[in-house]
Image (cartoon, rainbow, N blue to C red):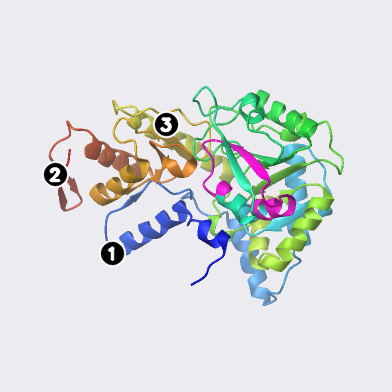
Amino acid sequence: MSLSHIAKTISASPTLKLNEKAAILREKGDPVIHLGGGEPKSKVPMDAILASASHLNTGEVRYTPADGIPALKKAIIRYTEEFYNRKVAPENVIASGGAKQAIMVALQAILNPQEEVIYPAPYWVSYPEMAKLCGAVGVAAYPEDGSFYPRIQDIEQRVGSYTKAVIINSPNNPSGAMYPEEFIADVVDYCERKELYLIMDDIYHRLIFDGKKPINCYDYAKDLSEKSKIILINGVSKQYAMTGFRIGWAVANKKIIEAMTNIQGHQTSGPSVVLQKAAVGALNGIQSGVESLRVTLENNRNVMIDYLNSFEGVKVTKPDGTFYCFADFSAYEKNSTKLSGMLIDKVLVLTVPGVEFGMEGFLRLSYCGTIKEITEGIERIKWALDPNSPNELYIGDRKLVRDWS
């Protein structure tokens, strides 16, 4: 069978594969603990449920405009004004099938084959594959000091004649690092001076801890006209726990949004009207659920970090936000894929190998589950890796025997 060059080079999403594996194991009745997912356990806001149900009851479930229904665009405009102090027009907004599609369509609108898009490492697993889907090249920028916090020099050193765009994801998936205000200011200024597109992936911007406040990229922009090359990405999946609704959006200059709309119109048309109505309900409804989720995640993070710090060989940086910590397990096993596979096979704990995020020897661990899942999951991992662990472990009624070194 003959496949395209792009099809041959694109790999499956490792996080989606893990979700599938967890579902299969649970269907079999295995007591699996999924520490690899990025899906909050809190309920979807009632305002979102009621809004979608109300529209379903009309029986009028039809095509939508390729860039989103007016009610959702109006809610996004209000959200952008409230959280970014930025007034935009409906022509500056596109609603997509999740923030992932918004990023993908943005890249298709701005990248030519062989051009490059730069992003700090560790990076979200989809950025390199998205670049490939455009025939472009993803370029990881590793912080020179070995931390999760890049400096502008780390970006500058990777910029070349083919560079077209920079993606900044802060707070960051997988590390949970919230980049310093100075870095955000520097990267906005640098991209303006070099006339590079700047995609701000802000999907976690309200899920931050320790009293930190969201950083607004527009505060540092000198050009807020229709020539601005900032593309702001957000959505309802994370902060409203609406991962299955698949509604995200982009805010950018009118020319970019027009191009994105044309592309999206031929790809998928507009997102489902029922799901867009749900997003309107979430954005315009009671917001206490976001803070409740944030507080829960902060507490869960503290529990996970305390447990990880009990490992002699694990190095972990305390996350500033998101659902994840990115822990260095290289003292036990430098091959993160091998390590992750061993933890699934031996103790039924799912983790994401660090190599998928551009850093070998690490595992991404999610703390958006329950405290019980976090503590029992880490205890199983410790039992599997610590040579001083007891020889036996019970998972429910199942006895595991430690028959490896």
Q: Is residue 258 above or below residue 343?
A: below
Q: Does the magenta stretch include residue 110?
A: yes
The stretch in magenta equals 103-128
Q: Residue furthest bottom?
A: 59
Residue for badge 2: 403
Q: Nearer the viewer, residue 378 or 351?
A: 351
Q: In this view, does 342 lie above or below 27?
A: above
If you read the primary sequence from the N terminus, does the residue marked by circle 2 or circle 3 appear first?
Answer: 3
Q: Where is residue 5 in the image (x, y as percent from the top left)?
A: 56, 60
Q: What type is the residue that disc 2 sits on?
A: Asp
Q: Nearer the viewer, residue 61 or 335?
A: 335
Residue for badge 1: 28
Label 1 crowd (10 A; few <14 / some 14-19 / many >=20) = few
Mark 2 to mark 3 CA distance (whole Å):
32 Å
Residue for badge 3: 302
Q: Residue at x 36, y 45 (%)?
A: 337
On-image quarter of the C terminus: top left
